[in-house]
């Protein structure tokens, strides 16, 4: 079967059967299109004609040239390619998966960077005063409070609707739809609850009046759903106002959420559930972030660790 046809079938499979997000699907399509362009230069028109050496050479080409890709990007490309070949094998289009024995590029052991509690407080203050009546300030504070309180991904946050919030006497619960359309319930503390209530009462109605009744929780100045890019920008603006020098993104708040929970003694499995991780192994990285805290506790409390 020709490459374009099997690739289209595979992408359709990801969308219909696997339920991958639009962003993930777009990334797979982009990576596979680049792979197909390379195969064309090698005069390969059928997926059955691809050899292991061909894939290895393609991956090597990604690491060379004027703009070599990082190991993480090359690993992502390999994941897309491997998924395509596995799909073709499963569907009986090919007799052998030539990517089966290809190892992924070695990734640097980089730990996520988390903000300190003091930096989180400064970032929130950078969004503007709590008592503000400015709809944008109220929205930005609510977004930042919710991002840190829930650990949700930025794509999950901008997709939230008002109905996904369930206010209670003591706790507010948030229903998040994550990867693979899997839903999870996240409890939200009093600070985020207060910020959300202020936004819903004094901020969102003013923004919604400029739109056409969008159900999304976070809206822009035109009353339309807040985009991922706008969410990134509001965090950057708050960080600038707070004079925080570290690079801060929506994912920084997610990392900080997980790190602070584990440092506080939360079970790694519970943190993984809150983050929407499919495997506890994904969450294990945050236990390494707490090594300094463990070291301090050990040195302060163990009788044989103390120095005279």
Image: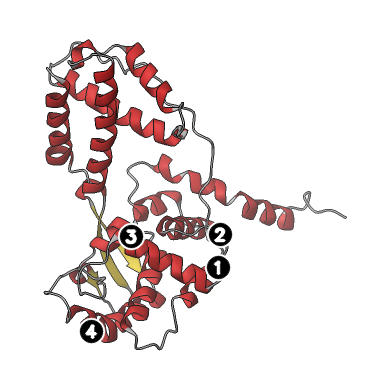
Q: Who comes first in sequence, dot 1 or dot 3?
A: 1
Please say if 30 is above or below 258: above
Q: CA distance from mark 1 to mark 3?
A: 22 Å
Label 1 near label 2: C-beta < 8 Å? yes
User: What residue would you read off at disc 3?
Assistant: 229
Label 2 near label 4: C-beta < 8 Å? no
Please, what secondary structure does the residue beneath circle 3 have?
Answer: helix
Label 4 near label 3: C-beta < 8 Å? no
Residue 19 is marked as: none
Please say if 55 is above or below 275: above
In which quadrant will I find the N terminus?
top left
Label 4 Cα neighbours within 10 Å, binned few <14 / some 14-19 / many ≥20: some
Q: Who comes first in sequence, dot 4 or dot 2?
A: 4
- Image coordinates for residue 166, horizontal then vertical, percent: 23, 72
User: What residue would you read off at disc 2?
Assistant: 246
Name the residue rendered at 45%, 34% in the picture: 67
Front label number (4 vs 1)? 4
Q: Who comes first in sequence, dot 3 or dot 4?
A: 4
Residue 206 is marked as: 4
Q: CA distance from mark 3 to mark 2?
A: 19 Å
Please, what secondary structure does the residue beneath circle 1 have?
Answer: helix
């Amino acid at each position: 079967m020709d490459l374009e046809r099997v690739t289209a079938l595979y992408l359709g499979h990801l969308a219909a059967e696997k339920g991958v997000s639009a962003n993930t699907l777009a990334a797979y399509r982009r990576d596979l299109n680049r792979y197909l362009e390379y195969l064309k230069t090698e005069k390969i028109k059928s997926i059955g004609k691809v050899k292991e050496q061909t894939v290895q050479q393609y991956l090597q080409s990604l690491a060379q040239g004027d703009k070599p890709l990082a190991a993480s990007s090359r690993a992502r490309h390999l994941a897309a390619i491997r998924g395509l070949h596995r799909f073709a094998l499963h569907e009986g289009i090919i007799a052998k998966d030539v990517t089966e024995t290809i190892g992924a590029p070695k990734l640097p052991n980089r730990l996520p960077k988390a903000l300190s509690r003091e930096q989180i407080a400064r970032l929130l203050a950078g969004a503007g005063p709590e008592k503000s009546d400015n709809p944008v300030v109220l929205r930005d504070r609510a977004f930042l409070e919710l991002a840190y309180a829930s650990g949700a991904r930025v794509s999950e946050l901008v997709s939230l609707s008002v109905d996904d919030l369930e206010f209670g006497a003591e706790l507010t619960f948030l229903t998040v739809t994550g990867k693979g359309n899997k839903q999870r319930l996240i409890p939200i503390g009093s600070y985020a609850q207060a910020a959300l209530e202020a936004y819903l009462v004094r901020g969102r109605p003013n923004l919604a009046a400029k739109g056409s009744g969008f159900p999304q929780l976070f809206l822009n100045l035109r009353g339309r759903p807040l985009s991922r890019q706008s969410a990134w920008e509001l965090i950057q603006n708050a960080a600038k106002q707070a004079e925080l020098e570290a690079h801060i993104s929506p994912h920084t708040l997610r990392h900080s959420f997980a790190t602070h929970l584990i440092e506080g003694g939360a079970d790694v499995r519970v943190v993984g559930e809150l983050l929407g991780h499919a495997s506890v192994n994904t969450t294990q990285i945050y236990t390494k972030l707490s090594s300094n805290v463990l070291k301090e506790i050990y040195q302060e409390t163990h009788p044989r660790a103390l120095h005279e």
